[in-house]
Amino acid sequence: MPSKDELLKKQTKKMRKTLLFSALFLLFSGNIQAQTQPDITSWLRNTTLTGYGGYISNVQLVQYNATYVYVSTNCIPEYAIGPWPSNPNVPSPQNFVCEFPRNPVQNTGTPTNVGLGNIGLWSNGVSIFNSEDGFHWSGTGWAMGPGASWNRNALIFEGISFDSCLGHPAPGGNYHNHVNPKCLYNDADSTHHSPIIGYAFDGFPIYGAYGYSNPTSASSSITRMKTSYALTTDTTRAGGPHPISTYPLGDCIDDYIYTAGSGDLDAHNGRFCVTPDYPSGTYAYFVTIDASLNPVYPFVIGPTYYGVVGSTNTHITPAAPDTTYTGGTTATSELPNTTIKYVIAPNPVEDHIYIYMDIANMNNVKGSLYNAEGRVVKTINDLMQPSIAYALDVTDLPSGMYILSFEGSGKTVTEKIIKK
């Protein structure tokens, strides 16, 4: 019979194994949970596809720890961009590493202004800029930099240099959007909740133009999110009289006044709501457009952030230890991929349809484009795989309506495509 000491040793050894297994399980399951969080999985990662100038496009690396997500990007999209009339700048790689808090909180103190330059990233790693173009009315003319009032509206003064994706490069080559990034998602799809198309530097998600009509119910109808800002007729501000004799209302962002409850969104251009990605609810920003898909002030984020923002956001050294997001783990790869999920841009299209197959997508999906008569006019030669982007050249097709069909494992989904 084993002695008391031997029994104690066996019991201690067994307990250590149990504790070790439990610790590994918690670590492993925690990593699985972390890798499935939207702030990690929503980024369009890529290390092979090139965009403008042959530069690597989209997001090159996503790293994270319990506190932050770090996104490495060139700020070059994979879809075609340019030209930029009246703009001498050209896009160039920015080599940003941007930091986003993983546990964002409301700023209960003085709200932080969304300054000039980057205020967040779109999900493809392209920069988000605010609604201003960087000039204000000095009383006698336009002066460079933000002012106390009468700051110029970027859409009005720089819109001529926007490309068909509504973006343009800044001095130094930082390609960005001040307004709705129409080539990143289908901004004409008013029947589905828009996807996450980016994150602000306070860590809160940015959605496309459509959300649930009832912010607390995922079963409510889909509606286009409406801003609570509208033009005012007031012609005085702290900065002096409005230059209205030459510049009409709307040329300055200060011409827009917020009225609580007049739209769906608050003064930051967001709201607390349930979304497909956050079924328990989150604060989220929404881009704002009108019924004709034209950008509406404040475009993305209001004059101030909702949450707390760090002082530096674009040239960060990730804090160790951190984990690199790989798009899946042993455990998640064993889960059956039985859905067909994708992102299409742009739509309407002129030359190329860009398709990104979601990381949770099933394998070996066939893609076909049908014309209005039901005839196949284009196919994607390779079987489509998760987390891969594809391009379909439709330059030679006549204008009209088409149906893009995805088929795999007995499932079929379709998307209406408009060729301009």
Image (cartoon, rainbow, N blue to C red):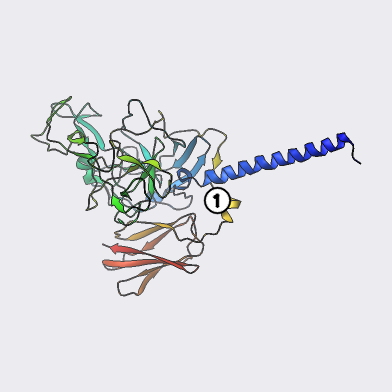
Residue bearing the label numbered 1: 328
205 or 322: nearer the viewer: 205
Percent of width and height locating residue 52: 37, 50
Q: Residue furthest left?
A: 245
| Position of the N terminus by quadrant | top right
Percent of width and height locating residue 97: 45, 37
Vertical relation: 418 (above or below) 150? below
Neighbor class of circle 1 (other Cα within 10 Å; few <14, some 14-19, many 20+) is: some
Percent of width and height locating residue 386: 49, 57
Vertical relation: 113 (above or below) 211? above
Percent of width and height locating residue 330: 60, 52
The three-letter code of the residue at mark 1 reads: Gly
Q: 147 left or right of 232?
A: right
SS for callout 1: loop
Who's the residue at 47% across and 62% down the image?
Answer: 384
| Position of the C terminus by quadrant | bottom left
Q: 73 left or right of 32?
A: left
